[in-house]
Amino acid sequence: MTRVLHILDHSLPLHSGYTFRTRAILKSSQSAGIEVCGITGNRHLAQGPPVETVDGLTFHRTATRLISAPGIREWQEIEALRAGIERVAKEWRPDIIHAHSPALCGMAGLRAARRLGMPFVYEIRAFWEDAAVGNGTGSEGSIKYRLTRALENRVVAKADAVFTICNGLRDDLVSRGHDGNKIVLSPNGVDLTLFGHPPARDETLAASIGIGSGPVIGFIGSFYDYEGLDDLIAAMPGLRKHHPNAQLLLVGGGPMDAALRAQAAASGVGEAIVFTGRVPHDEVERYYSLIDVLAYPRKKSRLTDLVTPLKPLEAMAQQRIVAASDVGGHRELIEDGVSGLLFPPDDPQTIAAALAGFVDAKERWPAMREAGRMHVAAKHDWSRNIDRYRAVYQELLGRAPSAAA
């Protein structure tokens, strides 16, 4: 039986899109007969024991005190994680090292794999330098931006195989001169066994948070600037002109929370915009039941053009109606007019008009719900996606690993 050691930025029991994708990969691997365990570095901030089992998955922790200046500190992180990987590998004896972005995990995994003489796989979920620009913690072209990209280029060049979650990331790597033959797609996916028929509208919850008969436009997720929620709030006055009872339900939190609440209060339609704050993961389905249209108004940027989000797929798996900005990441997931609606990004007036027209065309929604679920089942079901990993693992185990890092 093949054993794969996964190198991770953070993991369960923390909840994020990153940890949910990791869970899906590891659980699907187990179902396919692959033994797995994970190891995290200094950026896993949850308190817990050195070895932790969550949801039937085992994670080893590596935490090292870092006291050096920026730049040197990142190399300390890499070396500490590399040592942790080698320690776990010598005890657990995996067949393959599989690191997941960011590049700090990739370099630690690469160095450990080469020292151990094992095949090395690197998986990119986003370019973290672009994500830093998107969430306001970095700037394009800065020294940190260029160093992060250079480190990732090195990991990609030295890896035996590379996975990306979408074509946008793969095409960008090829444009940099990387070998496209070793870059394999592993798209975002969902575990369809977790989704049955969508639940009936939770009238008790609706009454408790002030949600009426609608139409209800909603967003469930993290409040980052690149998500474009300010544009969605700015679109609400225009939408209310066409549909006076329309409401906006925003479930979640994040860096933009305070600014969005202030914007909503000053919008003139603040009474129609409901913020819930973060809610327990096991209650999210109740909030989905209140929403007529899940909206994803991401702003246009390198990050949103190159990276496919997970939330629209989860919504389609639950047979929810989706509307999203027409950026590259969304175009890989949603066929306009068939499985959902695409509207121009960064333009609140146009968003309002598009959503108003979408609400007026409710007769098209049943077919869209079915098309969305069929799309997820055909191309984004983890029970099928895992075959991509298994094929690469089997191929790598049949040949010697590449040269030293």
Image: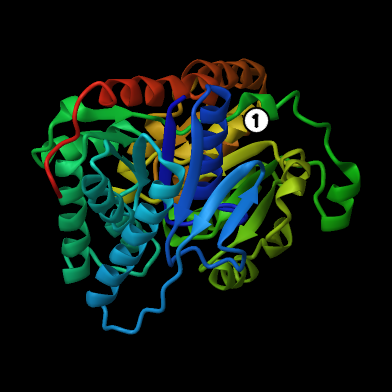
> In the image, residue 209 lies at what x, y percent?
82, 57
Is 182 left, or right, of 338 in this rendering? left
Is disc 1 placed on a helix, strand or loop? loop
The kind of residue on which mark 1 rests is Arg
Indicate whether 391 appears above or below 4: above
Picture residue at 53% right of the left edge, 67% below the top: 45
Is 202 left, or right, of 21 in this rendering? right
Q: For residue 119, which quarter of the picture?
A: top left
Q: Give 215 or 340, whichever is nearer the viewer.
A: 340
- The colour scheme used to paint the residues is rainbow
Q: Is residue 245 visible?
A: no
Is 397 left, or right, of 370 in this rendering? left
> In the image, residue 383 lies at what x, y percent?
54, 21
Q: For residue 136, which quarter of the picture?
A: bottom left
Is 171 left, or right, of 177 in this rendering? right
> In the image, residue 357 lies at what x, y percent?
57, 32
Total marks shown come to: 1
Indicate whether 263 appears above or below 226: below
Q: Give 68 or 311, whichever is nearer the viewer.
A: 68
Mark 1 residue crowding within 10 angstroms, few (<14) / some (14–19) / many (20+)? many
Picture residue at 25% right of the left edge, 21% below the top: 398
**Outermost residue, front side:** 91
Picture residue at 35% right of the left edge, 36% below the top: 96
Picture residue at 64% right of the left edge, 70% below the top: 265
The residue indicated by pointer 1 is 320
> In the image, residue 382 lies at what x, y percent?
52, 26
